Amino acid sequence: MTMPDYAYDIDAVRAQFPILHVEHHPGVPLTYLDNGASSQKPLAVIEAMDSYYRTTNANVHRGIHKLSEQASEAYEGARVKVRRFIHAASKREIVFTRGTTEGINLVAQTWGRANLKPGDVILSTQMEHHANIVPWQMLAAQTGAVVKFAPITPDGQIDADAYARMLRELPVKLVTFTMVSNVLGTITPAADMARLAHDVGAVVLMDAAQAVPHMAIDVQALDADFLVFSGHKMCAPTGSGVLYGKAALLDAMPPWMGGGDMISKVTFEGSTWNDIPFKFEAGTPLISEQIGLGAAIDYLNALGMDKVQAHEHAMTRYALDRLAELPFVHVYGPDADKKGAVAAFSMDGVHAHDVAQVLDSQGIAVRAGHHCAQPLHSLLGTAATARASFYLYNTFEEVDRLVDALYVVKRTFSV
Amino acid sequence: MYDFYRENILDHDRNMRYRGVLDPADIDYEAVNPLCGDKLRLTLRLSEDKTHIEALAWEGEGCAISKASASMLGEMILGKSLDEVRAISKQDVFDLIGIPLSMNRVKCGLLSLKALTVALYGLGEWERREQAEED
């Protein structure tokens, strides 16, 4: 194993994550390799939320009292941090959501219902998470629009020719795709795909759930019309998340949920809407969670997203090399240079659930199942895979532990 | 080694009893575990007077827990009357499996009982049992 050529004190990083130091079973340390599902939280995030509840807790945007003002400042401060983190042109373009899924549903039910007609095509890809399939199928049922899926190549890349052809030949109004596949790990050519989509006048949504936690993102360089992600996969709490949208698009969209905070004026005869982003934030928001997201962004910035990405890339390369040593293990998706920090695999003669269960006995947490990508799994010819996914605190030794434990699985099932 | 996978679970996983599809069958039903997408198809043949289970077969994809529980449940119900089968509870199946299941794996362990219950008595019967648990 070669030492990584970037400055990254992994022990200091791990010291910031209390859960990594809790024994998984008596005498067995935790090897947390389920980061694609959710990441662990550093002290800075835990303490930000704790401090909020101890000293600042109040509702935002309405109160005149000091606590409400402080809460509002912290909440809106988080919005500014998000804006800078993804290089949005304005904080008005940052809509807080509960996560990626809510962001996609919001776009489908507002922009989608207002803009799609029968026969219009929503173009997605064959490697999407259910969250980027089902909302569009629901929208199609409501509007008469049609959902199509650009095919992928055998090595798990978008079929660029087929994608371009579909854009040319179909009346595509919206293109929606993942930036990093949660199963294959494939990093899609998002900026190129957006450019081609814009050439035919389509609006582009990027599912960045597996991208924002792992790499520097610039929504303006990508020319994304909408970009969605979740906080909980990037060191922030569950319930935090973001919909980025270009201001002109957000302005023209009708609201989704009605209620407090999203209105400008309410009378018994009717109501008018608040400005963006508040038009899309009905009800008391997830205040402490979004403040926690702000703290997570501070943490990631201090670490440096370039270093995070370099570390994860080295981890992924090492993991794929080690897994390739095991003839009874089959990894899905492209080579390390073309993928994010994920290795979904199957094992000869052992169901993924059983792989995960035995790995758990060895202290190793992986995901097993279809990872909310059933259509992709049927394409791969398997109902379920096991998935190891890495984050900024994982170590090369943990990869070795995974490999050793896969031999335990093999022995357990005598395969 | 790891005692979650006791020898009888592994044995039923590897050599699932009554594997296949009956054709013709009196009852043909496929249950799906929405958490993982695993499927289990049950075909059943009843006695001439329609009171007893005369033959059965399981077909499908699943983890060791779901396959072993189907295999053991099949052994339990073969030749039994429909009234006896109706009385089989979730706990009876947990007892067959014999190891504690975590929340996320309960659905694996009970997929076969769900298939059996829905196939013979309808989805309403299964939902009634689930609701009764919640209340």
Image (cartoon, rainbow, N blue to C red):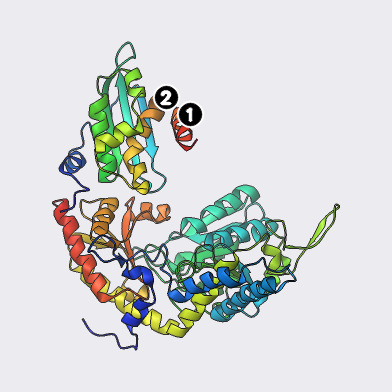
Q: Decide which of B46, A277 is in the foreground and name it.
A: A277
Instruction: Tell me which chain the residue with mark 2 is part of.
Output: B
Is residue A330 shown above or below B135?
Answer: below
Q: Residues within 10 Å of mark 2 (few under 14, many from 20)?
A: few
Q: Chain of mark 1?
A: B
Give the residue at mark 2. Answer: B121
- Badge 1 crowding class, 10 Å Cα cut-off, few under 14, some 14 to 19, many 20 or more, is few
Q: Which quarter shows the N terminus of chain B?
A: bottom left
Task: State the residue at coordinates (35%, 23%).
Answer: B87
Res A56 quadrant in image: bottom right
Residue A144 drawn at (x, y percent): 63, 49
Q: Residue at x 33, y 84 (%)?
A: A9
Q: Which numbered circle lies on residue B65?
A: none
In the rendered structure, which amino acid carries the disc numbered 2? Tyr
Tell me if residue A367 can be seen.
yes
* Element at label 2: helix
Q: Nearer the viewer, residue B135 or A374?
A: B135
Would residue A89 appear left or right of B33 to someone viewing this image? right
Q: How many marks?
A: 2
Residue in the image at 28% along x and 27% along y: B22
Left or right of residue A324, residue A394 in this image: right
Residue at the spot of label 1:
B124
Residue type (three-letter) at the residue carrying disc 1: Gly
Q: In the image shown, does B109 or A320 lie closer to the viewer?
A: B109
Q: Residues under labels 1 and 2: Cα distance? A: 8 Å
Q: Position of residue A300 (x, y in %)?
A: 46, 79
Query: Could you tell me if residue A192 is visible in this image?
Result: no
Locate residue A316, reporting x and y percent.
Answer: 31, 73
Q: Secondary structure at mark 1?
A: helix
- Asked if the residue under mark 2 is in contact with the one under mark 1, i.e. CB atoms within 8 Å, the reply is yes
